[in-house]
Image (spheres, helix red, strand yellow):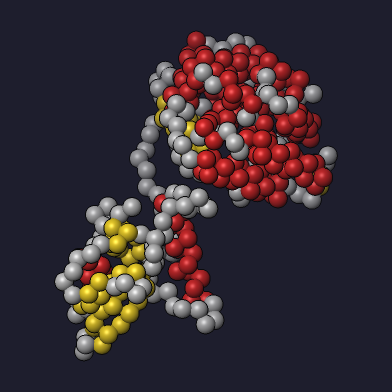
Amino acid sequence: MPVLKKSALDGYVKARFGSTAELVAYGPIGKETQGARYKQYGYGAPIRLTFRTNGNKTRQVVLGTMSPGPFGHEHPADRAQAMLMDYDCYSRLPRHITALDVGAFTARGELMSVAAAKEFFLLTEWSEGDTYHKDLERLADATRPTPLDRKRTQALADYLATIHRVKRRDPQLYRRRLRELLGHGECIMGLTDSYPHRYGFITEELLQRIEVACNAWRWRLRRQHARLSQVHGDFHPWNVLFRRGADFSVLDRSRGEWGEPADDVTSMSINYLFFSLCRHGTLKGPLEVLFHSFWDRYLSRSHDQDVLTATGPFFAFRGLVLASPLWYPKLTLTLRRKIFRFIENVLAVPRFDPADVNRYCD
């Protein structure tokens, strides 16, 4: 981790409390460095800063930092979220110490305040192209895939096989990602909570049964931490921009850079099924060809046959999105029933077989 430097702390104190402020001592509480000693401290322990202001008035404040850890603090964004929440809520609680500022460390170890911020934004570059879902809409009414359709499908599979080769050894992070698949507000439980009390055949009992089955999968997979890989995290057709030929860019990487490869593979492949179900009520025609082409290519390039034993809860997550009355309000109950049959059937088998996809919908 970076270290706290006296020069950076002194500059921050002057910027925050006035140009006459002078840092007198700093360091872990009870072990402060004084005078001209330039001892440095790492992040994690609270640091007490003692400084003089105009008129030689002495003041003390505490600078809190956070180290990476396995309890939802693995990523810099996790730690930023915790600090922003603390700043926002400390002063609203009676008798709580006052939060004076919230800030960040720059790449040079300098401290900058972000206390005035209310909402954050992200600025990205623009990329030309058409989202891949347009291809799938066209293919739902086509008689056969074109050579370009095949190349694009293979390019997507190759891309995933390539990024998934980058591994990370972190058992706790792999378990966290499985835990988030179930309990994160954007994932399975967030989705089941968004369903109406009853929607046709979709009852609370059905949704609860799916949650229970997904948790059983979490326990089944949690020891497979060697599978932790570089992932996109939201690899669906609306997040892929194709330009000429098979050249594409990806958008909106979500929920972190590490996870289970099955997340990406199911996110894309279920859409070949979905667009065909919408048009034909089954997987057939060019979308069936590309569904199998995608899986065959990914398995041959990734050499990861074990991904087939990890797809269950990830297919359930994506299926809950596609069958959702909130996200897809115009689907028929018949189509939603097929998606739920697919969810329950893939959760019920220990290994997904791409050749049986239509059977899973029946």
> Where 128 falls versus 32 (above or below)?
above
Depth check: give the residue in front, 170 or 283: 170
Q: Position of residue 96 (x, y in %)?
A: 50, 79
- The residue depicted at 25 percent of the width and 75 percent of the height is 25
- The residue depicted at 45 percent of the width and 26 percent of the height is 165
Q: Is residue 330 shown to the viewer in this render?
A: no
Q: Can you tell which quarter of the image residue 320 is in?
A: top right
Left or right: residue 127 compared with residue 91: left
Quadrant, the C terminus: top right
- The residue depicted at 64 percent of the width and 16 percent of the height is 288
Q: Can you tell which quarter of the image residue 206 is in?
A: top right
Among all residues in the image, which is located at the extreme front? Answer: 31
Depth check: give the residue in front, 112 or 2: 2
> Where 215 falls versus 96 (above or below)?
above
Left or right: residue 138 compared with residue 158: right
Q: Position of residue 106 (x, y in %)?
A: 28, 56
Left or right: residue 55 compared with residue 286: left
- The residue depicted at 59 percent of the width and 36 percent of the height is 223
Please tell me how many numbered marks the rendered image carries.
0
Q: Position of residue 79 (x, y in %)?
A: 44, 56
